[in-house]
Amino acid sequence: MLIAIKRSALAALFAAISTQAGSAPAEHWVGTWTASPMAADSSLDAANSGLNAQTVRQIARISIGGHRIRVRLSNAYGSRPLIVGAAHVALHGVGPAIVAGSDRTLTFNGQGAVTIPAGALVLSDPVELTVAPLSELAVSLYFPVATGPVTWHELGMQTTFISPSGDATAAASLPIAATSTSLYVLSGVEVTAGIETGAVVTLGDSITDGYGSTVDAQHRWPNFLAQRLNDTAALGSMAVLDQGISGNRLLHDTEGPDALARFDRDVLAQPGVTHLIVLEGINDIGMPGYLGRPDEAVSSEEIIGAYRQLILRAHAKGIKVYGATLTPFEESGEPYYSAAGEAKREAVNAWIRAQSEFDAVLDFDRLVRDPTHPTRLLPAYDSGDHLHPSDTGYRAMADSIDLHLLRAGSGR
C-alpha cells in the first residue's frame, strides 16, 4: 500500500512537471523603444559636461503598447559608477508636463536609487502602467551628485528637459533650467507583450537616426514604419527599435562604436528581436575624405564583407535580415562626396540587389533618387543638405516597405 501511494505521488509530480515544461508563457518582454548609447562629448552639448543634483526628463515615443513596462539605463561609457537617486516614468503630457495620475516610481531591485557600475547597464523593476501603441512616455532621472560627462545618445530629435537643482522626478511639470535634443543614460523601454509579438531593429547611421527630420515630430523613417505596423493590426504586433547613430560606420569608429562592434549590444541583446533592417555604409565611403583620414578608406568589397558578417551573426540567432540600398549623396559636396566614392556606392548597391544573402532587399536608393539624375536625391525628398531625406522622404521610405516581410516566419 505504501509503495502504491509513493508511486501515485511520483506520477502526480511528474505530470505537474510535464505540464509546466510543455506550457508556453503567455507573454514575454519586448523592446518598444531604444536609443543606442554613445560616449560623452561635452563639446557637442554643454549639458553633457555633467549633471549635478539635477533632474532630467526625457521623452520616448514607444512603438507597441502594453500593461507592464521597465526601462534600461546605461553607464556604458562612464569612467566611474553613476548614481541615480530617483527615477519615475509617466505618460507624457505637453512640454515638460506629465499626464495626471500616470506617474510611477521606478525601483531597481526594490530600491528607489541605484548605482550603475562603469561600463554597465541596469533594468528597472517592472511597473504596472497601461501604455498605448505610439504613445509618449516621460522618464525622469535624478542625479544627486556630480556625474561628469555621461553616456548619451547625441541626436535625440526630441526635446529633453533639465531642471535646476533638486529632485523633481515626481513633478507634474518639470521646472526647466535648460533643454537639449540629446538623451542621457536612458537607452531602452520594454513592455510585456504576447508571445507572438516580435521586434524589428533598424540598424544604421544618421538617416536611420532621423537627421534632418522635424524635432519633436517623430518623423524618422522607423517612426513612420511603427505607425504603419500599428495601423495594420491584421499582420500582428511588431515593435520597431531605432538603433541609428548619426555619423556611424560599419568598419571604423566615428560617432559611437562601429556597427560590427555594437551589433551584439544593439541587435542580438534586444528583447524580442526577430527582424533586422540594415541601412549603413555611406559614412564608410564619405567619412575618410571628410575627416581627412585616408588610412580609413575602405573598398566596396570590405563594405560587403561587413554586411556578410552581420548577416551571419543575425542568422545564427534566427533573425531575418533585410538589406537597404545606400541612398544618393552626390550634392552633399566634397570631400565627403567623390567620383570614386560614388563608384563604391553603386558597386555596393549592385551587390545588395543581385545577391541572395540578405533575406530581402529594401531599395531605398531607387525610391528616393531623382530619376533624371540618379546620383542625387529627388528634391521633394531632400532635407536641404542633399544627403539626408526630409520628413516627406522618410515617410516615403517607410511606406515602401512590404509589411508582410515583418511577420513571424517571413523573409527567406
Image (tube, rainbow, N blue to C red):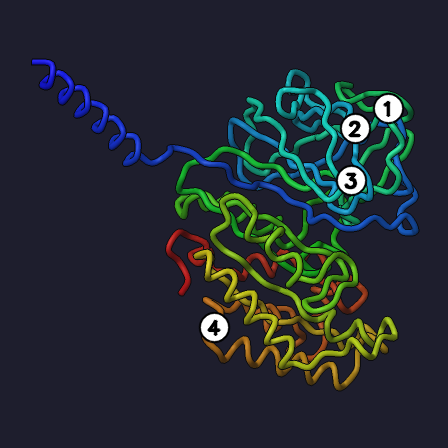
Number of residues whose C-alpha sits closer than 10 Å to that of mark 3, classed few (under 14), some (14–19) or many (20 or more): many
Mark 1 or 2, nearer chain start: 2
Cα distance in 3D space between marks 4 and 1? 52 Å
Residue 118 or residue 311, whichever sits in front = 118
Give the mark nearest the N terminus, 4 or 1. 1
Which one is in front in this view, the residue at disc 3 or the one at disc 1?
3
CA gap, disc 2 to disc 3?
16 Å
Label 2 amino acid?
Answer: Pro
Q: Which of these two is toward me, 266 or 92? A: 266
Q: Residue furthest left?
A: 1
Residue at position x 91%, y 23% in the image: 165
Residue identifier under label 2 = 96
Query: What x and y, as percent, mark residue 405?
Result: 44, 58
Kind of residue at disc 3: Tyr
At mark 2, the secondary structure is: loop
Q: Which residue is mark 3?
A: 184
